[in-house]
Image: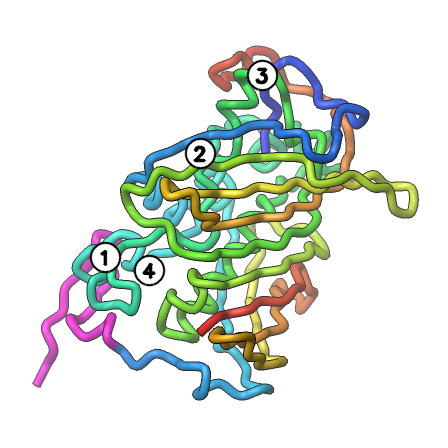
């Protein structure tokens, strides 16, 4: 029997059962597991939309003239915050829950090179450790994002908590 | 981050422990929507109460990466400009508990430290978020490469409108 479905305001179709999908728990995760990769396309709109959240209408992220002075290139690199934010949907899609990410999640990020409009970023994660501290259980991951040329744009580590 | 204000942040003024700005917000659906849309992240847990109530958390929450618009307004009040002086190099972000709709969140930006490495200057910011109960909900230690004020400089007025190219 078909489940009832509806569209969210973003026209994403979800079913009544969507939120209740089985979530990954600490014991379901093993060292060496790969996280399902997450892909995002960087467009000029990516920088403009994020810039709007802090009223940026003039920085080098969205203005080529300023970009040259600010970053040494006219290509308007997207904000680092936009690049690092791709880790969140990757982690939440993998766990099928936001809880281990929002209650004790940690993300360490280092930017290797710029990304800009036209780039495709693919986010990867691999489980590198599991620890128990008191009543909290942690899963540690190596994370990185690479561009369409296979070059690393961002590297780091992440931690989720159970 | 954009250039704001009229007074340049000087490297010499960046004393560890100095609080640069503090802002208090009541978290609204629009705050969450604006950033989730900015990141093209359409997970309904950020916008759909019906969906959210069936999740492990049970409520609409703010995403891990939410910034609430950086620090433009308080910097403007202090006539400081910030952002074009720096390039974001690395960060450590931690979320201790979610931020929910209606939470009153205070976000504080301070100088954690400054250092020089291989002839380059680095500035480390500490950004902490507490809720209406005084609980630390989020922390970011953000390292930026200090480049000073670049050229060409675009001038803006206090509303953020470009007045001279």
Element type at mark 3? loop
Location of residue B118 in the rendering, given as x and y in whole percent from the top left corner: 91, 47
Q: Answer few, some or many: residues within 10 Å of disc 2's Cα (few below 14, many 20 plus, some between 14 and 19).
A: some
What residue is pinned by disc 4? Answer: B43
Compared across the picture, whether B11 is left or right of A66 comes to right
Q: Residue at x 66, y 66 (%)?
A: A149
Write the start and end of the magenta stretch as one range: A1-20
Q: Answer few, some or many: residues within 10 Å of disc 4's Cα (few below 14, many 20 plus, some between 14 and 19).
A: many
What residue is pinned by disc 2? Answer: A52
Q: Marks 3 and 4: CB-CB under 8 Å? A: no
Element type at mark 4? loop
Compared across the picture, whether A105 is left or right of A80 comes to left
Element type at mark 2? helix
Tell me if residue B25 comes above or below residue A89 in the rendering.
above
Q: Is residue B66 magenta?
A: no
Instruction: From the viewer's side, name the closer residue of A135 and A159.
Output: A135
Q: Residue at x 50, y 19 (%)?
A: B160
Q: CA distance from mark 4 to mark 1?
A: 11 Å
Q: CA distance from mark 3 to mark 4?
A: 37 Å
Q: Is residue A2 magenta?
A: yes
Compared across the picture, whether B27 is left or right of A71 comes to left
Q: Residue at x 43, y 62 (%)?
A: A103
Q: Which mark is residue A117?
A: none
Label 4 or label 1, whichever lies nearer to me, is: 4
What residue is pinned by disc 1? Answer: A11
Q: CA distance from mark 2 to mark 1?
A: 23 Å
Location of residue A11 in the rendering, given as x and y in whole percent from the top left corner: 23, 57
């Amino acid at each position: 029997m078909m489940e009832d479905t509806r569209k969210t305001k973003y026209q994403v179709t979800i079913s009544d059962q969507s939120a209740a999908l089985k979530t990954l728990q600490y014991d379901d995760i093993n060292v060496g597991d790969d996280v399902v990769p997450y892909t995002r396309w960087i467009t000029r709109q990516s920088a403009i939309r994020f810039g709007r959240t802090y009223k940026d209408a003039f920085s080098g992220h969205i203005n080529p003239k300023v970009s040259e002075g600010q970053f040494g290139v006219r290509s308007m690199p997207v904000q680092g915050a936009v690049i690092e934010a791709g880790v969140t949907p990757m982690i939440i899609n993998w766990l099928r829950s936001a809880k281990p990410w929002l209650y004790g999640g940690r993300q360490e990020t280092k930017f290797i090179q710029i990304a800009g409009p036209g780039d495709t970023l693919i986010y990867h994660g691999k489980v590198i450790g599991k620890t128990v501290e008191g009543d909290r259980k942690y899963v540690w991951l190596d994370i990185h994002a690479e561009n369409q040329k296979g070059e690393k744009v961002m590297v780091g580590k992440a931690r989720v908590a159970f | 981050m954009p250039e704001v204000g009229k007074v340049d942040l000087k490297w010499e003024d960046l004393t560890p422990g100095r609080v640069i700005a503090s802002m208090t917000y009541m978290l609204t659906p629009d705050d969450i929507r604006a950033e989730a849309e900015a990141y093209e992240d359409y997970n309904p847990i950020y916008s759909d109460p019906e969906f959210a109530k069936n999740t492990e958390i049970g409520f609409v929450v703010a995403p891990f990466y939410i910034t609430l618009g950086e620090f433009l307004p308080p910097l403007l009040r202090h006539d400081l400009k910030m952002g074009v002086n720096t390039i974001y190099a690395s960060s450590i972000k931690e979320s201790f508990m979610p931020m929910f709709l209606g939470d009153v969140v205070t976000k504080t930006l301070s100088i954690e430290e400054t250092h020089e490495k291989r002839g380059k200057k680095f500035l480390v910011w500490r950004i902490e978020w507490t809720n209406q109960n005084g609980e630390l909900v989020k922390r970011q230690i953000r390292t930026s490469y200090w480049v000073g004020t670049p050229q060409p400089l675009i001038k803006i007025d206090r509303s953020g409108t470009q007045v001279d190219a």
